[in-house]
């Protein structure tokens, strides 16, 4: 079979990370995703050409691009015409922006009752904080991620990356797909609403659980989560690298003791039971640190791995983007872009045994598909498209 | 309308966070989610009764529970019978476990070609690292999250929470929904495969982008991401609290200057252009720190918010779980559990304007629905279910 979303048409009005990730997942699952950009292009593009931001290239593979000025009356009319041909519309403007432009959910739903309109925001479309300005950074602050990240003797810290944005985007995707499933039964579209703040809540399940159980807010700890598992940390090795180790089952503990040459402690009353290890966590970590510092990161990793211990090297970004495993699986691909040069791009992280994998196609230039889309989807003649261009509508 | 997934039957064989979050999203969107547990219950439950882990309660709302011993021959046969009645099966065992039990994808696909079989693992079902033991902790290490979290003078740190687990679970959900969409066209099921490692790649888009642009791996920084935006940090206030501030647009900079009483710097050549601010970031942060330390966190937040600056208080877990905004929206609900007492539980973070919201129902006890499910779905008489119980099959 080809791909699961073949035949689905998506209007992607989104920018930066959250919404574009959602559109990327659709495009690489076979949907026709039309990126609708302001004249000049979405702002994540960066300087363009060889200086295109890799993040833009990452999140906009396999999309088509048209330009459209939504402040122009003719631009709004064109969007309404496109909506009649579309299954899904994605937008991640601040709440109320699309309404003020006259192309909000109510209006577009009227035009196409089967339309699935997906809104991604920081705080949602209702509630007292609806209009708070939201980016990944501020959502990390309000969601509890920052107060749970870092060491207690340092200020609260950001989690690396932009987890709130991407978590928002993948929830938009899940919601859009669910709405397509629902539409099969009813024929009706729906507004799908995702708030990054709400989508992030579940990531802190261990922290909320520890707080509930003890009545005390767990201290942030950059080495481990507030679960009762020991050992659970990262350990420095002789070459300055680190390994992460976690002892989920009792058998892991015995394997660890063998690797670090402390079989004498198997069955020892201070360490045998998980509760005892929790009490003696400092001593346990001391043993592991004493061992780790005598071997390189890769030696530590390989020895523990062969022994069947849950272990992983803490990898830097170079190692991650060159990961032989992900390249072997085709999740990461090295591609040669005519202007950017060599880039490593990820494919859709969701795979289907019964469908073909999408071939990765580079992001489009702004308006690259103006003639194709306005021609095929709206039936405009080439000179009509040219007129829209010269009138600065598209 | 009721809910988008009404009529969809899900067999949820998952445990801990990743798979159960996927099942939770389905259950709170109207699917019949049958949690299939080993006798004695899934291990995240904790001590049970009042000591049930809140994380378990959070991720298992609105599910039904049956028990089933998959190592028992009759248990395998029962699973196969259930599969004939199901649309989706979720599992997050290590790769190969279901195959070794004789109930892997190939076998179940044969029994029910329309079945959507969703596998959630750390590294996927192929590739050289397929069999590496994976938990959130080790995926944070291999994905690059740890090397991108924390301060450069400290060891690499964990991001707070369990982002890899939850990111894996929501990608499983997106994949399952996509497969349902595909099945409408083809009638065929599929294996859906999600690797936590691959699902996490996109969260580090800024980091990979900075690395690509400069050729240097960006240093981890707990205050900000390696974008070119300034100001972008968290600032300590007079009461020991912090605010997160990010200056996305040029207008924000002028608003910030007004709030901190430095209108004199509007248009100043050292700070006016984003590139100049990036160069003079230390001086910019010094100004903001000098101001923030004179006001409380809430004063800082409210003043900046009113001025239209992207700002947020860094909230602790108590503030997050009592957030008036999320409670007003019904995203968080205070409920009284007969044994756990008062708990705060989150509802599905995806909302649909044209469907009813699920009423949150507490997690089931292990095997609570044995009679109902084995009776209704497989047509077993009460004495047959009783015999399975006494034979320790279920």
Image (spheres, coloured by chain):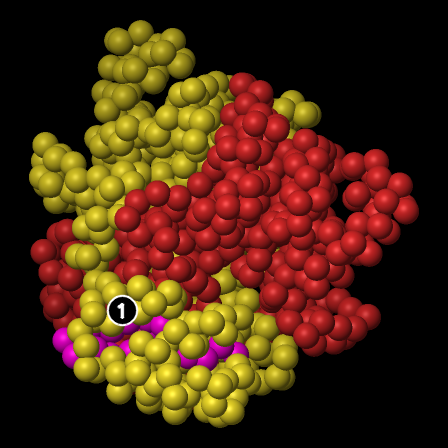
Chain colours: A red, B yellow
Whether residue A112 sits left or right of residue B259 in the image: it is right
Residue A97 lies left or right of residue A208; in this view the side is right
- Give the image quarter of residue A331: bottom right
Nearest to the observer: residue A284 or residue A61: A61
The subunit letter for the residue under badge 1 reads: B
- Provide the secondary structure element on which disc 1 rests: helix
Please, is residue A352 above or below residue A332 in the view? above
Q: What residue is drawn where x is 76% and y is 61%?
A: A365
Quadrant hosting residue B12: top left
How many callouts does the rendering have?
Answer: 1
Question: Any magenta on residue A147?
Answer: no
Spot occupied by residue B190 in the image (x, y as percentages of width and height): 61, 34
Answer above or below: position of B211 versus A178.
below
Query: Can residue B381 be seen in this snapshot?
Result: yes
On screen, B384 above or below B317? Answer: above
- Give, as a single range, the part of the protein colored magenta: B228-245
Q: Residue visible at 19% across and 77% down?
A: B295
Q: Can I make out residue A282 in this image? A: no
Residue at the location (20% across, 67% down)? B298
Q: What residue does disc 1 label? A: B303
Dot 1, crowdedness within 10 Å: few (<14), some or many (≥20)? some
Q: Position of residue B242 (x, y in %)?
A: 25, 73
- Closer to the camera, B186 or B215? B215
Q: With respect to residue B65, does A200 lie above or below? A: below
Where residue B131 sits: x, y (%)? 51, 57
In the rendered image, residue B235 lying in the magenta stretch gets the answer yes
In this picture, residue B235 sits left or right of residue A59? left
Q: Residue at x 68, y 31 (%)?
A: A84
**The one of A132 and B184 positioned closer to us in this rendering:** A132
């Amino acid at each position: 079979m080809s791909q699961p979303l073949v035949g689905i048409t998506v209007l992607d009005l989104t920018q930066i990370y959250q919404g574009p990730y959602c559109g990327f997942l659709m495009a690489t699952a076979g949907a026709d995703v039309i990126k609708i950009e302001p004249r000049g292009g979405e702002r994540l593009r960066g300087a363009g050409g060889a200086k295109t931001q890799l993040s833009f290239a990452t999140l906009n593979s396999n999309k088509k691009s048209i330009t459209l000025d939504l402040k122009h009356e003719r631009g709004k009319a064109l969007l309404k015409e496109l909506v009649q041909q579309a299954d899904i519309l994605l937008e991640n403007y601040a709440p109320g922006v699309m309404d003020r432009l006259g192309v909000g959910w109510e209006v577009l739903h009227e035009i196409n009752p089967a339309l699935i309109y997906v809104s991604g925001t920081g705080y949602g479309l209702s509630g007292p904080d609806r209009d708070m300005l939201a980016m990944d950074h501020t959502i990390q602050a309000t969601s509890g991620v920052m107060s749970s990240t870092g060491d207690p003797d340092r200020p609260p810290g950001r989690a690396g990356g932009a987890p709130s944005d991407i978590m928002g985007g993948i929830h938009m995707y899940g919601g859009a797909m669910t709405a397509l499933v629902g539409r099969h039964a009813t024929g009706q579209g729906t507004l799908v609403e995702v708030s990054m703040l709400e989508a992030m809540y579940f990531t802190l399940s261990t922290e909320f659980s520890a707080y509930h159980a003890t009545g005390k807010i767990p201290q942030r700890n950059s080495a481990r989560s507030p679960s009762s598992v020991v050992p659970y940390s990262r350990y420095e090795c002789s070459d300055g690298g680190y390994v992460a180790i976690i002892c989920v089952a009792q058998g892991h503990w015995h394997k660890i003791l063998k690797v670090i040459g402390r079989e004498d402690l198997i069955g020892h009353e201070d360490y045998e039971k998980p509760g005892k290890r929790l009490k003696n966590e400092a001593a346990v970590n001391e043993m592991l640190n004493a061992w780790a510092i005598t071997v390189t990161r890769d030696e530590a990793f390989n020895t523990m791995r062969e022994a069947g211990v849950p272990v992983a090297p803490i990898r830097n970004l170079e190692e991650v983007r060159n990961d032989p495993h992900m390249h072997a699986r085709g999740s990461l691909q090295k591609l040669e872009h005519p202007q950017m040069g060599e880039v490593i791009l990820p494919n859709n992280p969701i795979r289907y045994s019964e469908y073909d994998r999408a071939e990765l196609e580079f992001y489009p230039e702004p308006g690259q598909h103006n003639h194709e889309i306005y021609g095929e989807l709206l039936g405009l003649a080439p000179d009509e498209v040219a007129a829209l261009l010269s009138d600065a509508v598209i």
